[in-house]
Amino acid sequence: YRFVDCRHNVVAADAADAPPIVKEIVAGLYTPRRLPGRSETRYRSLPLVLLYDNVGLDLFDRITYLPEYYLANCEIDILRTHTDDIVAQIPDGSDVIDLGCGSLRKTAILLEALNRQRTDVAYYAIDVMPDPLHESISKLVPKFPNIAFVGLCGMYEEVLPRLRESPRQKTVLWLGSSVGNYHTDEVVQFLEQLSSSVLAPDDAILIGMDKLKDRQVILDAYCDPQGLRAEFAFNILAHTSTVIHDYARRLRGSDPSTDCSPPAVFDREQFAYVNTYDDEIGGHKIFLEARDDVSVRWPREIADWISDTYGDAAGDGLVIKRGERIFIEPSYKFGDSAAEVLGRRTGLVLSAKWTDRQENCMLNLFRK
Ligand code: AVJ
């Protein structure tokens, strides 16, 4: 099968030319921002995509097996119950594009049916880390010989330009209520971009959405007694440290295998996992709360650039005060008319929808 690494690996000579993800980390920590909703409080934040390194992807996959994390179970229920209806929407000779495919546990349900019912379907699996992506795909390649597998490694914006290359009809999968990780305005913007740059008339996008429901059910879904969720959230701190230190090492021009390990940017022991639900906006949020005053330790290679950009003392280290919460992840929930609203705002046509037996989640199929 074909594997394409779409990640932009810029090798910068100067700290000011930091890759976008490094700039985003620093900006998010130095510039607290208001979150949607009534509260005026401003929060520092970290880029959500950093939840998903090798460890984070594995933790997320384990989370999907937790009974209280109904999102995965309900979406699997929809996919199993309505497999034939969904597959009927994906004709022979077309491409299936999976945004954030993870372990492929869910998509495998559709691929199994496509392998039986079609002779010519290409499947593009997209995710951010090369090794887990390769591992997920290579498990399925021998099982589904009628499907042409392609792995595309990178973030959405890095991968989308590649998708233009194929002239075939397309069905984009955006499952798992990943859409809930973005505010509606961002979702509309992303779908408009996807539609105008990748989709042709009649191409489809299948979007999984978690429905509004009893707040306690939602809060329980994001807080398990085993502490997998806290682990998942803390891992963003470790991944952030890795990204920052990899960059500092590149600036030093030193070899990662012989380099002694510098102190992490954060100590996870200094944070507590906090999750909240705001009924008014239908939004679940994950935060990491400082248990003490936390000094953020930047490597010296980027300290000057940070102090030039964010003020004199900045490079000496940022202090996050005890009790302050770093915003990690929003998970918006959707009302019954959310899909229609999204259709109206994007110009995409809502052409089919499915729900699970408990009516916890929905799958909505839009066409351009
Ligand atoms: C992957 C976007 C579905 O928001 O529910 C799981 C990830 N975060 N536990 C979600 C997640 C915390 C998640 N999605």
Image: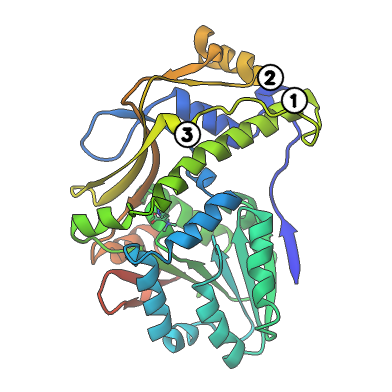
Q: Nearer the viewer, mark 2 or mark 3?
A: 3
Residue 306 figure quarter: top right
Q: What is the spatial separation of the Cα atoms under label 2 and label 1, in whole angstroms?
A: 7 Å
Sequence order check, earlier mark of 2 and 1: 1
Picture quarter with ligand 1: bottom left
Q: What is the spatial separation of the Cα atoms under label 2 and label 3, in whole angstroms?
A: 23 Å
Sequence order check, earlier mark of 3 and 1: 1
User: Which residue position is annotated with label 1?
Assistant: 251
**Left or right: residue 110 compared with residue 142:** left
User: Which residue position is annotated with label 3?
Assistant: 268
Say what amino acid the circle numbered 3 marks.
Arg
- Are dots 2 and 1 in contact, CB under 8 Å? yes
User: Which residue position is annotated with label 2?
Assistant: 301
Residue 126 figure quarter: bottom right
Q: Residue at x 40, y 32 (%)?
A: 271
Q: Position of residue 275 (x, y in %)?
A: 30, 44
Q: Position of residue 167 (x, y in %)?
A: 67, 72
162 in relation to 122, above or below: above
Q: Could one spot residue 164 in this view of the protein?
A: no
156 in relation to 8, above or below: below
